[in-house]
Amino acid sequence: MPAMQNYTLDDFCRMIDHTNLKASASKSDIEKLCQEAKTYHFKMVAINQIQSKLCARELAGTDIDVGAAISFPLGQTTIESKIFDTEDAIKNGANEIDYVVNLTELKNGNTAYIKDEMTQMVATCHQHHVPCKVIFENCYLTKQEIKTLAIIAREVKPDFIKTSTGFGSSGATVEDVRLMKETVGDTVKVKAAGGIRNSDTFLAMIEAGADRIGCSAGITIIQAIKKRMITDQVEQIKINRPYAKVKQ
């Protein structure tokens, strides 16, 4: 049975990866992103790798992380390239990594490659004490392929598996989040991203098993939740969370 958990407004803020991955994002756009993250106490800013140094400088002295996207958004680079870019991002101040798996090799049935890639990426991140998130891009996958990736993750143990880049044909769904969480159980956390633009969707993703939400609408979402809590005269919202039991 699901377990009831209580969340304060700050708990919700600390589940948000405040995102600007647009190719057209200017220096001032990224500085604004960092300022907003500080104002709302979000967990992380999600940015393209090259902006790691700027964000690290803007967020110095805070507990807000810098999350660099690697091989984004297609995942079609070699393992060696992904490792190099990961180490470069970390050197420049990133302290979380979100990388895109090589879906071509998954579609080819080359699960050994996918496991090797994930193993090397996780090892590189953990060597630097940096969390590693693996982006699946579920819109291009069958349910069985999603489960196959999640089973590999259950063995390799990245910190998170993530639904989407936000640049694919569609984003996160409650059904996919639930499938991912049911497969990895409490071994790996789940991040939902892509198309999460309102508080109802945000809360539904958490109820399905997501521990982190990647979105550009975090301010709108938090303001809506705050309004709801004021209206209901509560300081916490109760959410039923799924069992952490692994399904074999």
Image (cartoon, rainbow, N blue to C red):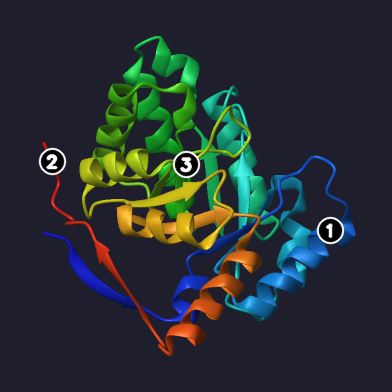
Q: Pointer 2: residues within 10 angstroms few (<14), some, or many (20+)?
A: few
Q: Secondary structure at mark 1?
A: helix
Q: Pointer 3: residues within 10 angstroms few (<14), some, or many (20+)?
A: many
Q: Secondary structure at mark 2?
A: loop
Question: Which quadrant holds residue 116?
Answer: top left
- The disc placed on residue 103 is none
User: Which residue is more in the foreground, 120 or 34?
Assistant: 34
| Left or right, 58 with reference to 10 | right
Q: CA distance from mark 2 to mark 3?
A: 21 Å
Q: Is residue 38 visible?
A: yes
Q: Which one is earlier in the sequence, the residue at label 2 or at label 3?
A: 3
In this rendering, the label closer to the viewer, 1 or 3: 3
Q: Which residue is mark 2?
A: 247
Residue found at x 64% / y 58%: 217
| Left or right, 46 with reference to 207 | right
Q: Which one is earlier in the sequence, the residue at label 1 or at label 3?
A: 1
User: Which residue is more in the foreground, 214 or 196?
Assistant: 196
Q: Amino acid at mark 1?
A: Asp
Across and down, in percent, residue 214 comes to: 55, 53
Across and down, in percent, residue 54 comes to: 79, 61
Can you name the residue that lies furthest to the top here?
A: 108
Q: Which one is earlier in the sequence, the residue at label 1 or at label 2?
A: 1
Q: Which residue is mark 1?
A: 29
Q: Which residue is mark 3?
A: 172
Residue found at x 63% / y 77%: 40
Q: CA distance from mark 1 to mark 2?
A: 43 Å
User: Which residue is more in the foreground, 20 or 57?
Assistant: 20
Q: Amino acid at mark 3?
A: Ala
| Left or right, 217 with reference to 175 | right
